[in-house]
Image: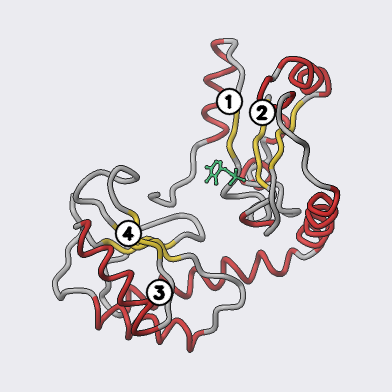
Amino acid sequence: MDADIADIAGICDLAERHGAMTYLDEVHAVGMYGPSGGGVAERDGVLHRIDLIEGTLAKGFGCHGGYIAGDAELIDWLRSTASGFIFTTSLPPTTVGAALASVRHVRANAERRATLFERAERLKQKLDAAGLPRIASVSHIVPVHVGEATLCRDVSRRLLDEFSIYATPINYPTVPVGHERLRLTPTPLHTDAMMDALVVALRAVLPRGLAIAA
Ligand SMILES: *Cc1c(COP(=O)(O)O)cnc(C)c1O
């Protein structure tokens, strides 16, 4: 929710020192990070150091379902022992077909990823230039501080009703009380004009002088 990214290499070092396994949830990153969209571990060159990686076929891939990736032996063991896997109906072939097409498309289209990060940077610049209370982030997710649950919900509702802009309200218990925020997620297809309209809308619905809580 802070749009931060873990020090994966540092955590791998720690795990190695103590003989621990590593499990990485890349759900927010697959499709978007790394040269072929493999996730942050691919971007950071540490894929080979992670024992199990979890990803989703929803979100970045726009389909449904998910996966874990690891050494064949470990996956084989999970296939034989993981009750959540054994007792769940497998995905329908249509869904798997769509996911496969999406994975192939996303892998092959690195320029979409480059555009996504260029667009996220542009949005951050525009919010900063307008003096809006953006929470600093190192990812494509751009949180904007609101700081109060009712206000956060109302602001999100007004953005949708009055400006046709969907910005997710994030309230307690997802974030601590006082850290309520809007969570903006630009896409490669958001234009400068759309971002300018967002800035105008945010200025209209956010109270003046909103400061980021320490
Ligand atoms: C959404 C999400 C999941 C679950 O993914 P689904 O494909 O929706 O089941 C797992 N981990 C994180 C961090 C998520 O945000």
Instruction: Please tell me which residue is depicted at 44% across the width and 81% down the height of the picture.
Output: 195
Q: Which amino acid does label 4 sit on?
A: Ile
> Looking at the picture, does residue 12 appear above or below residue 7?
above
Instruction: Please tell me which residue is depicted at 34% across the width and 55% down the height of the picture.
Output: 170
Q: Which amino acid does label 1 sit on?
A: Cys
Measured in 3D between alpha carbons, the distance from the residue under mark 1 to the one under mark 3, in whole angstroms, is 34 Å
Circle 4 sits in a helix, a strand or a loop, which is it?
loop
Numbered label attached to residue 125: 3
Measured in 3D between alpha carbons, the distance from the residue under mark 4 to the one under mark 3, in whole angstroms, is 12 Å
Camera-nearest residue between 98 and 104:
98
Numbered label attached to residue 12: 1
Instruction: Please tell me which residue is depicted at 69% across the width and 69% down the height of the picture.
Output: 112
Pointer 2: residues within 10 angstroms few (<14), some, or many (20+)? many
Q: Name the residue under label 4.
A: 135
Q: What residue type is labelled 2?
A: Ile
Q: Nearer the viewer, mark 4 or mark 1?
A: 4
Measured in 3D between alpha carbons, the distance from the residue under mark 4 to the one under mark 1, in whole angstroms, is 28 Å
Q: Mark 2 points at which residue?
A: 50
